[in-house]
């Protein structure tokens, strides 16, 4: 089975767009993603990027997991912004191996992406990926979220991030432009509720259920549950 091809079809990338936002043709997505996976496998041990070198595991647990949110992200963008401009920027905070930023930037070529990572060696890996894949819509910044200037991004995404708490939530909302939003890849909805209710001031948010092909579909395993938490800047 070709998990990448079949997974992209299950998410809907064969349509070429979500809510009026175009996506890269599926054949080009596959080509770039395969190059990215090869690069991950080559440098994984040296840079401690992901927890497996198995191709299909990377596809399911990292690539399709990252891309499962694209329909919902496109829906939110189309509903919140009447039109996007050249200075519309999506930031991947704590990008690490480039997840979800690189897969998202591949499939959504009309948006600008900034991958923010604090570790120098991982930034070097991300720069290599950007050059190898010809991602002209991507920039890399070695930085920490706490040091980023205010009101810089329209959308911040993050995956495998530490639990939301008062200080980090404040930092992430501060670096958003007015009208922007956060999109956090999270697991169990029960855990999300606990995190959000523990904040001194609960922001306006919603939890969107995600289906990750070959991971969450047809599974009642709570450990495989995936959600996207959309948090508005008040």
Image (cartoon, helix red, strand yellow):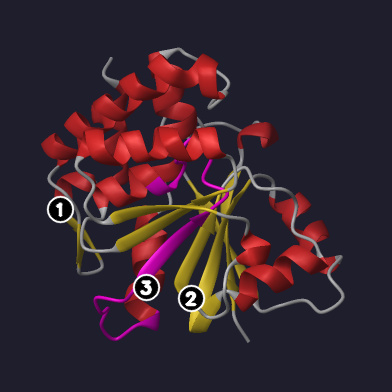
Sequence-wise, the earlier of marks 2 and 1 is 1
Q: Residues within 10 Å of mark 1 (few under 14, many from 20)?
A: some
What residue lies at 19% left-to-right and 58% top-to-bottom? 17
What residue lies at 62% left-to-right and 42% top-to-bottom? 160
Label 1 near label 2: C-beta < 8 Å? no
What residue lies at 54% left-to-right and 25% top-to-bottom? 50
Residue 46 located left or right of residue 60: right
Sequence-wise, the earlier of marks 3 and 1 is 1
Marks 3 and 1, how far apart in space? 17 Å
Q: Give the labeled residue for mark 2.
A: 152
Residue 125 location in percent, x, y?
42, 32
Label 3 near label 2: C-beta < 8 Å? no
- The stretch in magenta equals 80-101
Is there any visible trace of residue 17 in the rendered image? yes
What residue lies at 54% left-to-right and 76% top-to-bottom? 176
Q: Give the labeled residue for mark 1.
A: 16
Q: Quadrant of residue 67?
A: top left
Residue 26 located left or right of residue 2: left
């Amino acid at each position: 089975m070709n998990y990448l091809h079949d997974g992209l079809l299950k998410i809907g990338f064969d349509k070429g767009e979500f809510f009026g936002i175009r996506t890269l043709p599926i054949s080009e997505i596959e080509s770039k993603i395969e190059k990215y996976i090869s690069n991950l496998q080559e440098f994984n041990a040296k840079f401690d990027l992901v927890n497996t070198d198995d191709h299909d595991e990377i596809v399911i647990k990292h690539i399709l997991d990252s891309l499962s949110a694209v329909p919902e992200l496109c829906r939110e963008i189309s509903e919140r912004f009447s039109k996007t401009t050249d200075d519309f920027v999506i930031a991947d905070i704590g990008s690490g191996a480039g997840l979800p930023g690189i897969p998202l930037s591949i499939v959504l070529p009309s948006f600008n992406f900034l991958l923010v990572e604090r570790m120098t060696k991982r930034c070097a890996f991300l720069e290599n990926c950007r050059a190898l894949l010809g991602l002209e819509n991507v920039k890399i910044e070695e930085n920490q979220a706490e040091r980023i200037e205010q009101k810089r991004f329209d959308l911040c995404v993050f995956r495998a991030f530490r639990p939301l708490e008062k200080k980090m939530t404040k930092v992430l909302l501060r670096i958003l432009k007015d009208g922007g939003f956060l999109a956090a890849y999270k697991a169990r909805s029960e855990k999300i509720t606990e995190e959000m209710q523990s904040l001194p001031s609960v922001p306006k948010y919603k939890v969107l259920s995600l289906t990750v092909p070959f991971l969450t579909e047809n599974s009642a395993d709570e450990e495989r549950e995936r959600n996207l938490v959309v948090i508005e800047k008040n």
